[in-house]
Image (cartoon, coloured by chain):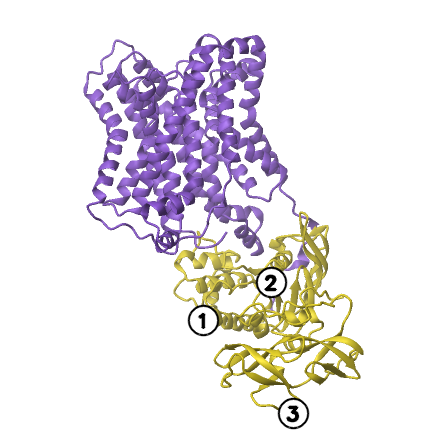
Amino acid sequence: MHSAPVSVQRYRLRPRDGRSPTVVAISVIIALALLLPLVLLALDAHSAGWDEIHRVLFREHSLFLLRHTVVLSLLVVALAATIGVATAWCTERSQLPAQRMWTVLLVMPVGIPDFVVGYAWHSIAPTMNGLLAATLVMTLGTYPLVYLPVAAALRRANPTIEDTAHSLGKGALATFYRVTLPLIRTAVLGGCVLVVLTVISEYGAFEILRYQTFTTEIFTEFQFDSQAAGALSVPLVLLGLLVLTIDGLLPRRPTNSTTPRRAPKLDQWRWTVVPRLLALAALIVIGIGVPIGTLGYWMTRSQHTTLPAAVTLTSATTTTLTYSAWAAAVTVVAALPVAMMIFRRTSAPRIVLERATYVTQALPGVVIALSLVFFATHYAFGLYQTSALLVAAYAILHFPLALVCVKTSVAQASARLADIGRSLGRGPIAVFCRITLPLLTPGLLAGFCLVFLTAVTELTATLVLDPIGVQTLATQFWAYQSEVAYGAAAPYALVIVALAALPGTLLGLWFDRERHTRPNLAS
Amino acid sequence: MSIIELRQVAKRFGATPVLNNVDLTVPDGSLTAVLGASGSGKTTLLRLIAGFEQVDTGTVAIGGHVVDDGRRSIRAQHRGVGYVPQEGALFPHLTVKGNIGFGLPRAEHHKVTQLVDLVGLSGLERRFPHQLSGGQQQRVALARALAIQPKVVLLDEPFSSLDASLRHTLRRDVIHILAQTATTTILVTHDQDEALALADQIAVLREGNVVATADPRTLYSQPPDITAASFIGEANILTAHVHADQARCVLGTIRLHTTNPPATDGPSRLLLRPEQLILHPETKENAISATVVEFQYHGHDALVHVAIDHPNHQILLSRIPGNLALTTGQSVWVEVRGTARAWPLTNHNTNPNNHTDFSSATGQSKPTGVSGAPRD
């Protein structure tokens, strides 16, 4: 027998590998941090006292706010789902000229903050107010949240199934309703949940369009009576939790993981495609053309304003970049151990973690910000009005987003590959650095980009938490537009959109890469 | 000398027992096949040897040294065991060269070229895994495992994801390479043809128990018990009465195989392989009349299901040369060639449904009539 470089005799038996206690401990700490806002909200409401809660909540005005929030959510979710599914079907199941361009343009509105869209419409048509205006703005901003998962599901769905339905005598419409729609149902529902959560946490757009919801009311109350704001947050959070509960109770079929053997047969390029193209073009003109065009229009107008500029455009940009980069880095670093933990065998800490991150989705930015203000003013006054608190709010708010990206990567860097690395004689640190980390990098970068993009466009939490004397692009924009200084506000909005476009493009490239090179090994 | 020794190894995941007191001894330089259906615990067995999982009870020894005793274990990176998983599982971010060199110290990286040659992939060093075919990926996975000069290589169904022709070529090449490097190998498979064709020793794993360990020839012709008999190849199981090295059954009186200890007298179960049943289209002395119920033509030979003309109409399986044309419904005469193995009919395996049941038309199915019969 030849000599083996690794020889068992040299090593002593060691206590068996257990679950790494460090990872568990870190994960539990992160879960607790994520649940902190809920606890603080409860404390806040408790300290406000029952009388205050009773006074704020049990009055006709609350019913009015609830009706406003619910009616708008239902309208927007119905419209966004319809548009999202229809556009996904157009791009994935018909032969369009410049296919990729349409996909990119359809997703782009997600990078334009809703408060900028609201401002764009309202500033060129001051009569754009109330329910209809809010519905329009929110629908245009949220349909990509349905479009993206549905397009991905359509891409994954085996086209042979649709062919089979045709061979069984079903026409295009019957096939869509009875075969395609059930296949993409989970994706549609997932998108709809995101849409509702976005609508109930939006503040800026509704403030501009003079449409009162819980969020606008909380914000107004916060400026005068923070305890009332805490009390008002309770129904808002309950509403979010209700949406998540309904979503969790809906039955889910396991997703069909078979990769399609064959590209779907696309409808041939014919004149019948023209109406689809026109509809898509109209949607893009309303969704991107109007806001960008309006910003351009105001840029050409006089930018003089009687208001003194608190900060220059450059310094606001620097501040925004710094905060967003910090937030993205912190969030991704926190998401990594959690994602790795979730992929281990089912265990109690894992379930707690998943639930905790899940619950965070139901917390609007304004609530997280308020709970942190409560925390700082009651327990850590030194933190009040510091950048650290704002970054912490961003991290909690965007944690679910980062987790989605990091989880995808962790799934690819399967534990099996790490096992093989160890069987080749490498220790855990070498295996992590040479196998796990390189495989995780794309997902970490994607998570970073996504959080960065969302932090740049964040308004509500920033308004509540930004340190005195510091202005980000969003807050400076907000200050100008509140005073109807539309021309002065425009450059700030334009920089926000431009900053968001860069990581947005990177993200698009990443997803596109995933689409073209399928992982060729089973994980 | 045995290089791998498992003693009374048990493993459960949560409440699910996966392996129950498994004993396995792998001689140095041999190729041992672990044969079992999916879910029988094959992969878990390999992962325990590799050190990816730890045993609950029992011991695992490599080269005479205990590496896991149920309480403490030597880590996977210190065991020197090569592992080739199903579908290769190459590191997707590394080239062929990077994959193969992963386990080598920097000073020994020149060996990569030799290994690339060994597995016949010269010129593909700079390719990434997704640029390789399934068979090429498996070759890289093998070279990567061999790079650390392992005492033993574990192959986890390495050929199952490949199409038939590629499977045969790769199988032959892999065995050749392993023989060249004199590497002890454990091959896990669900394919009995693969196990019979490649292995020096086969361990049959069933529901977490090793029900038989023997060389392929012995396992096929003289299986230790009726369960192992029906697991490997097609089997006809008949009830018989044994008396003095002879068995009386519906096919007449059949001579028994000389075994030690000799078969016990009394009610028994009898094993006859399909190729032991000769079919004659004309009546013949000592042959039992039967009716063809199914005829599966395979070219070189044919599998015929016949119902014997006996009140129990037992269905038997016969393998005949392919040039003998028979049609369904035709009368034939069954003659038994060679000796049979018999096991006493215990209470455990008194199954009212005591005929072989070929539920599948592929001819690959195992008789299910005895599947409920445990070993003891």
Q: Which of marks 1 and 3 is in front?
A: 3
Q: Which of marks 3 and 2 is in front?
A: 3
- Indicate which disc residue B37 carries: 2
Tell me which residue sits at (40%, 18%) in the image. A68
- Colour of chain B in the rendered structure image: yellow
Q: How far apart are marks 3 and 2 (CA)?
A: 42 Å
Label 1 vs 3, first from the N-terminus: 1
User: Which chain appears purple?
Assistant: A
The amino acid pointed to by label 1 is Ser
Q: Mark 3 lies on which chain?
A: B
Which residue position is annotated with label 1?
A: B165
Q: Quadrant of residue A446?
A: top left
Residue A372 spot, x, y in % from top left? 51, 19
- Label 2 Cα crowd, 10 Å radius (few <14 / some 14-19 / many 20+): some
Q: Distance between the residues labelled 2 and 1?
A: 22 Å
Residue B370 spot, x, y in % from top left? 68, 68
- Indicate which disc residue A43 carries: none
Q: Does any portion of residue B1 appear in the rendered image?
A: no
Label 3 vs 2, first from the N-terminus: 2
* Numbered circles on residues, count: 3
Q: In which quarter of the image is residue B284?
A: bottom right
Q: Which of B249 and A158 is in front in this view?
A: B249
